[in-house]
Image: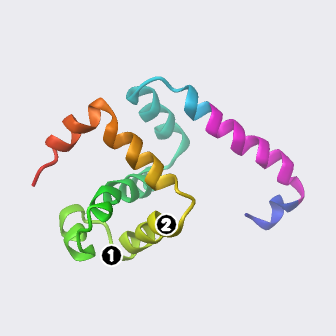
Amino acid sequence: MKDNRQNMRPVFKEAEESLYQTILTLENENECRCFFSDLCTPAELEALIDRWAVVPHIANGLPYRRIHEMTGVSVTTIGRVARFLTDGSGGYKNALKKWSSAPYAANSRSNKDD
């Protein structure tokens, strides 16, 4: 957290909670796309997408170099995601499990075959 925000921590905790609650109100992919396009810079959004793009490959046990070749995501980022996938808060695992069982996931995966 930035130093100048230390004294304002409760305000930012409320903002954090509000952000998550707001994301939960979005009803479809287009609403999410519009929200995240407004919320994030193109570089921030690209970083989020890169991280999510490698999660299924890591979970499937692909070597980092192969994931890099497939996605263009740096091996450093892949390693960081892998670390959080195994030792993080469980967010990646939970999201991957939910996404994998969603009806749209099978269609999305079939369009991404190598």
Q: Nearer the viewer, residue 42 or 53?
A: 53
Q: Earlier in the sequence, mark 2 or mark 1?
A: 1
At horizontal 45% and vertical 63% (from top left) the residue drawn is: 85
Q: Percent from the top left, x then y, of residue 22? A: 62, 31
Q: Is residue 18 magenta?
A: yes
Say above or below: 2 vs 13: below
In 3D space, how far apart are the residues under numbered discs 2 and 1 (Cα atoms)? 14 Å
Say above or below: 34 vs 48: above
Q: Percent from the top left, x then y, of residue 113? A: 12, 50
Looking at the picture, which amino acid does disc 1 mark? Val
Q: Nearer the viewer, residue 79 or 72?
A: 79
> From which residue to which does the magenta span run?
7-21
Splitting the image into 4 quarters, where does residue 63 fall?
A: bottom left
At horizontal 78% and vertical 48% (from top left) the residue drawn is: 12
Q: Percent from the top left, x then y, of residue 13? A: 77, 48
User: Which quadrant is home to the N terminus?
Assistant: bottom right
Q: Residues within 10 Å of mark 1 (few under 14, many from 20)?
A: some
Q: Residue furthest top?
A: 27
User: Which quadrant is home to the C terminus?
Assistant: bottom left
Disc 2 or disc 1, which is closer to the eye? Answer: 2
- In the picture of the structure, the residue carrying the numbered disc 2 is 84
- In the picture of the structure, the residue carrying the numbered disc 1 is 75
Looking at the picture, which amino acid does disc 2 mark? Phe
Q: Residue furthest left?
A: 114
At horizontal 19% and vertical 35% (from top left) the residue drawn is: 107
Determine whether the residue tagged by mark 2 lies in a helix, strand or loop.
helix
Q: Left or right of 46: which side holds 107? A: left
Q: Left or right of 107: which side holds 55? A: right
Q: Left or right of 39: which side holds 74? A: left
